[in-house]
Amino acid sequence: MTNRSCVIRLSRYKNALLRLRTLNFVRVFSENLADAAGVTATQVRKDFSIFGITGNRRGGYKVDELIEQLNKILGKDKIQKFILVGMGNLGKALVQYAGFERSGIKIVAGFDIDANKWDKEGPVPICPLEELSEVIRRHEIEFGIITVPDFAAQQVLELMIPAGIRGVLNFAPICVKGPEGCVVNNINLVTELENIIYFVNASEKTQESQQ
Amino acid sequence: MTNRSCVIRLSRYKNALLRLRTLNFVRVFSENLADAAGVTATQVRKDFSIFGITGNRRGGYKVDELIEQLNKILGKDKIQKFILVGMGNLGKALVQYAGFERSGIKIVAGFDIDANKWDKEGPVPICPLEELSEVIRRHEIEFGIITVPDFAAQQVLELMIPAGIRGVLNFAPICVKGPEGCVVNNINLVTELENIIYFVNASEKTQESQQ
């Protein structure tokens, strides 16, 4: 019944609501959320109805209640702990990304094989890769982020899984594969840029052929 | 006929081929590319047939020819130039990301409003935001990356478009909207992590209800 796109939209509604709350909004309408998430109001109502969230045609939704309901659906009613492996530039940027903490996501520790990167005194401790299993088990962490070079990514995934990781976001430019029951999403930055290049070129060609 | 998923798969095949070439592969089969991209061999052949790429049942595809054909389709037969606005941690990481240069993508310049970040002597010059239009026009750049805070993202997009940018990858945690004919993709890092949390929790619930 739910798919990746639907869950991504729920996240977007929730993030828009958090912003609206800072503007002192008490009520919000499906049209407002539609604008913020770049979808139609019908889509918003459809997504909500899947999860039994109902508004009031005249009064809309109550912002506070809606945030609470969405957080519960998204598993965000408690702090969600992540570990990250690969303290290159991207790994460092993600460990320092303020948006995570604001959204109830905490990177508990970073890991690297390079001793120059280790630092247990910082706000997020950076540890030797050998300590990965122990830290995952001690903090009962279920989620991981991979920002290592492509050749190391599958190996890192295979260290994470037996220690208890069940969901991974992989930025290494290679599709890593987890066992059944493990959620692995891949973001390839090159692919994302190539996608934009392709569609810009495609629209240029269409325009030329119309002239 | 082509959609975002198909183009993403073409990028993946191409990236796998580049790796296979470094291993001295001369020929490759749809089954090899299927494994590397995490799809079926039928899917690979279907994607290729859309673009008139044909192999040979016995001999497979020639790696060099296939890379050339895919690069052409993806608009990668020449260096593709980008600018990036927002030199925070993520912006810095992207400007330094070695994977782009290897894939024929060049970030020509970075921009920020903060004078402390300006640096015209580095490998990628970091310039004041005021120079954005001039640099885009001088280098005839069509592609941009946004890594500014959410409240500034739409404004940055609206500076980019009149100067000539036609495709944008936005990392600010807000959906920015471009005019018609402009390609804008949004990557929200929080949403990506929330997606993983949701699907791990959903699979836990399914397992519990089966017990």
Image: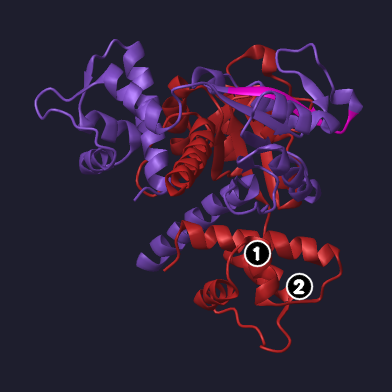
Chain colours: A red, B purple
Residue found at x 62% / y 41%? B168
Residue B211 in sight: no
Residue found at x 72% / y 45%? B157
Q: Quadrant of residue B166?
A: top right
User: What residue would you read off at disc 2?
Assistant: A64
How far from the left and from the top, in percent, is residue A84? 60, 33
Residue A149 in sight: yes
Give the spatial CA distance, label 1 vs label 2: 13 Å
Question: Which residues are the magenta region?
Answer: B106-114
Magenta-drawn stretch contains B132: no
* Dominant SS in magenta: strand
Kind of residue indicated by mark 1: Tyr
Relative to A145, say whether A88 is above or below: above
* Dot 1 and dot 2 within a common chain: yes
In the rendered image, the residue lying farthest to the right is: B115
The answer to whether A110 appears left or right of B89 in the picture is left
**B135 and A106: which is toward the camera:** B135
How far from the left and from the top, in percent, is residue A17? 73, 65
The answer to whether A4 appears left or right of B9 in the picture is right
